[in-house]
Image (spheres, helix red, strand yellow):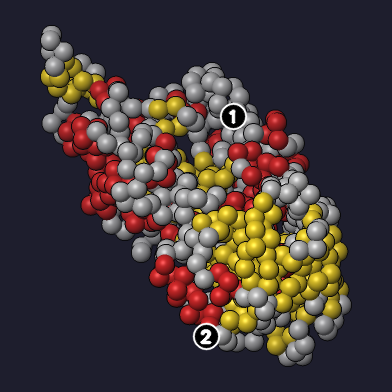
């Protein structure tokens, strides 16, 4: 594909912001101030931005009106009171003046080294609907009259701008799944196909980027489900080249934890990885930010961003665009004077004063540019994590599994339970509900693979998969509410530990030849290990991943801080090829192979305080360079110490053999 590699190719990492002009926000195309935008883009470029997502407001660029006869029947479309000109722009209902302004803006972006992702149909912005007056009251997703004009908009806009060097990619628009209601998955798919086909007719070279978040993983054609589930990750992937995540801490499960702690900086990365893996497309964090005044001060917010950036890099996360470039607290127009809108999101104040987050963007850009290798090779995944369908809170459960795996040093790839089963040495089914989202064929195939030597782990929520006793050599004796439940003691070869995670239900298990590795507070066995053919299975009698996400600060509190050791135990064989180990649960490691006998190890400190941690190095591997050198590494041989600042990482180079 002939396009900018940022966000679209593995190993690359783009940085930038979602841009509205500092003086006018959504009125920027009408309140046209090139002098202000010149200063805006200069400030962004000086602080590490390379990519801007921009929003041509739909009614500004296609200001069609509809005239009616005296009896109320439609007569024609016009531009205000003027007839549509018999020109390319006129036949598309487009404003030549606004298109000229967009061309000027693109020229400005090119001068300041900013590539543009264009959100074509910006009809929804900050919970306000923007539609041409002539289409008011129509559903932009399903009304054929509206869709005709949308396709004309897209084809004309893309045709006119396709040769401009500043354009990197096209969005469908801004969160178009919120722009109107799709009554079915087919309706959502039809809309996306119409817009994608219109783009590709005029510009087959540049990628189409979703511009939406993923509320469901895979749509079921013909199924009855909430409307937002109709825009599934898999459906988006069918019609675009790159997927996106839009993550806001204050609206997610992470809001229970401080914003610079482990869960808060890893759950956004888990979501991004989940969407990309399930969709089979590159995925990057197109939006993230926070209501600053009520959630974090500037220093804490900078730590939050820094932690996300390092963990995204470790996960081949494509890059990040902050929401948004400038504070909007001086804007006095809707939707900014409505209840919902947050006004203090910016990298900069409305007067262009850089916030601490702008400094983080610049520091990370400088770090990436300083590396002696152009891209960071992806870290191979040792395990497949299977997440369910509509009965499961897939994002919460996937995030719990992802965080525990990262704490254990295990790298996951995700898939939805009905997709074709990926090859792996280890399969995880976390906090399973119902049939764990698995098709009958996949459950049968999974059992076959375990018999041939794979490892399977399943933690139980409200699960009713068949052949449970046969597979795990343990059975359910009963299930009941127990106000005293939630306390567990584990006896693993690596050591004993306790967990205290309040659970509303207790599942009482009995072994049928399996080895019991843990018991609850009443002495009932709750974690089993057994052979299954040539493979091994692990059955946990409570929904570990869900509870870790539900209990505030569980990952760093005494109640849950040892939970990651369960994952380390089940993954021992799968991680046999790793060269690094550690005991610090707030330190994460990913290993990135560079040819034969060389690895880059990315170490991240996921706490808002500096740390000094010991790393275990496999015999036969020698530490070389450290990037950045300020991350002091001391020691030789099988044990080294690394010093890292708050929510900061480093890349360590290792080679097989002596120094």
Crowding at mark 1 (Cα within 10 Å: few <14, some 14-19, many 20+): some
In the image: residue 555, left or right of residue 60: right
Name the residue at 15% across, 19% down.
Answer: 74
Q: Quadrant of residue 155?
A: top left
Name the residue at 45% across, 75% down.
Answer: 445
Quadrant in the picture for the N terminus: bottom left
Question: Is there CB contact under 8 Å for labels 1 and 2?
Answer: no
Which label sits in the foreground, 1 or 2? Answer: 2
Residue 291: percent from the left, percent from the top?
64, 34
Taking depth in this image into account, of 284 and 443 the one nearest to the observer is 443
Q: Is residue 303 above or below residue 127?
A: below
Residue 553: percent from the left, percent from the top?
76, 48
- The residue pinned by badge 2 equals 452
Residue 245: percent from the left, percent from the top?
51, 49
Q: Quadrant of residue 328?
A: top right
Q: Quadrant of residue 611?
A: bottom right
Q: Earlier in the sequence, mark 1 or mark 2?
A: 1
Name the residue at 75% across, 72% down.
Answer: 517
Identify the element where label 2 is drawn: loop
Taking depth in this image into account, of 38 and 245 the one nearest to the observer is 245
Identify the element where label 1 is drawn: loop
In the image: residue 645, left or right of residue 232: right
- The residue pinned by badge 1 equals 342
């Amino acid at each position: 594909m002939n396009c900018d590699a940022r966000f679209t190719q593995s190993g690359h990492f783009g940085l930038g912001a979602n841009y509205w002009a500092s003086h006018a926000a959504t009125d920027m195309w009408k309140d046209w101030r090139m002098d202000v935008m010149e200063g805006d883009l200069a400030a962004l470029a000086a602080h590490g931005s390379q990519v801007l997502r921009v929003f041509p407001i739909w009614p500004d660029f296609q200001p069609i009106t509809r005239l009616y006869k005296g009896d109320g029947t439609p007569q024609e479309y016009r531009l205000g009171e003027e007839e549509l000109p018999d020109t390319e722009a006129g036949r598309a209902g487009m404003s030549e003046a606004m298109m000229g302004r967009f061309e000027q803006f693109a020229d400005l972006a090119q001068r300041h080294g900013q590539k543009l992702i264009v959100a074509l149909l910006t009809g929804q912005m900050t919970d306000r609907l923007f539609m041409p007056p002539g289409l008011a009251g129509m559903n932009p997703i399903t009304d054929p009259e509206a869709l005709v004009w949308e396709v004309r908009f897209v084809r004309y806009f893309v045709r006119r701008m396709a040769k401009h060097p500043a354009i990197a990619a096209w969005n469908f628009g801004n969160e178009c799944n919120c722009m109107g209601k799709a009554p079915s998955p087919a309706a959502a798919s039809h809309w996306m196909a119409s817009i994608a086909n219109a783009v590709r007719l005029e510009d087959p070279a540049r990628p189409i980027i979703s511009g939406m978040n993923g509320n469901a993983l895979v749509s079921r054609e013909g199924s009855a489900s909430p409307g937002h589930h109709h825009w599934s990750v898999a459906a988006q992937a069918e019609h675009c080249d790159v997927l996106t995540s839009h993550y806001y801490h204050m609206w997610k499960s992470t809001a229970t934890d401080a914003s610079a702690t482990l869960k808060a900086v890893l759950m956004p990365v888990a979501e991004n990885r989940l969407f990309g893996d399930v969709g089979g497309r590159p995925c990057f964090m197109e939006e993230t930010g926070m209501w600053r005044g009520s959630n974090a001060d500037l220093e804490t917010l900078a730590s939050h961003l820094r932690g996300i950036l390092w963990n995204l890099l470790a996960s081949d996360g494509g890059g990040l665009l902050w929401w948004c470039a400038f504070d909007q607290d001086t804007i006095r127009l809707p939707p900014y004077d409505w209840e919902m809108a947050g006004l203090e999101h910016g990298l900069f104040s409305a007067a262009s004063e850089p916030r601490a987050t702008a400094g983080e963007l610049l520091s990370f850009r400088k770090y990436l540019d300083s590396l002696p290798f152009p891209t960071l090779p992806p870290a191979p995944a040792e395990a497949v994590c299977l997440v369910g369908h509509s009965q499961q809170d897939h994002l919460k459960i996937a995030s719990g599994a992802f965080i525990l795996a990262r704490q254990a040093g295990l790298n996951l790839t995700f898939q939805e339970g009905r997709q074709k089963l990926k090859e792996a040495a280890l399969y995880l089914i976390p906090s399973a509900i119902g049939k764990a989202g698995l098709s009958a064929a996949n459950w049968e195939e999974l059992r076959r693979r375990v018999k041939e030597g794979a490892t399977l782990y399943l933690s139980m929520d409200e699960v009713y998969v068949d052949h449970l006793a046969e597979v795990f050599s343990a059975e359910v004796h009963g299930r009941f509410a127990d106000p005293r439940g939630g306390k567990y003691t584990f006896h693993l070869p690596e050591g004993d530990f306790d967990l205290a995670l309040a659970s509303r239900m207790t599942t009482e298990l009995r072994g049928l030849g399996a080895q019991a590795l843990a018991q609850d507070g009443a002495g009932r066995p709750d974690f089993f290990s057994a052979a299954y053919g040539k493979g091994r299975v692990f059955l946990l009698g409570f929904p570990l991943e869900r509870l870790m996400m539900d209990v505030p600060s569980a990952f760093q509190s005494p109640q849950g801080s040892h939970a990651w050791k369960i994952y380390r135990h089940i993954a021992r064989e799968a991680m046999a090829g790793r060269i690094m180990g550690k005991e610090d649960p707030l330190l994460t490691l990913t290993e990135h192979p560079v040819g034969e006998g060389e690895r880059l190890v990315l170490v991240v400190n996921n706490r808002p305080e500096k740390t000094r941690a010991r790393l275990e190095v496999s015999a036969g591997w020698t530490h070389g360079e450290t990037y950045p050198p300020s991350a002091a590494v001391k020691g030789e041989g099988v044990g080294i110490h690394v010093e890292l600042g708050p929510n900061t990482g480093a890349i360590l180079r290792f080679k097989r053999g002596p120094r």
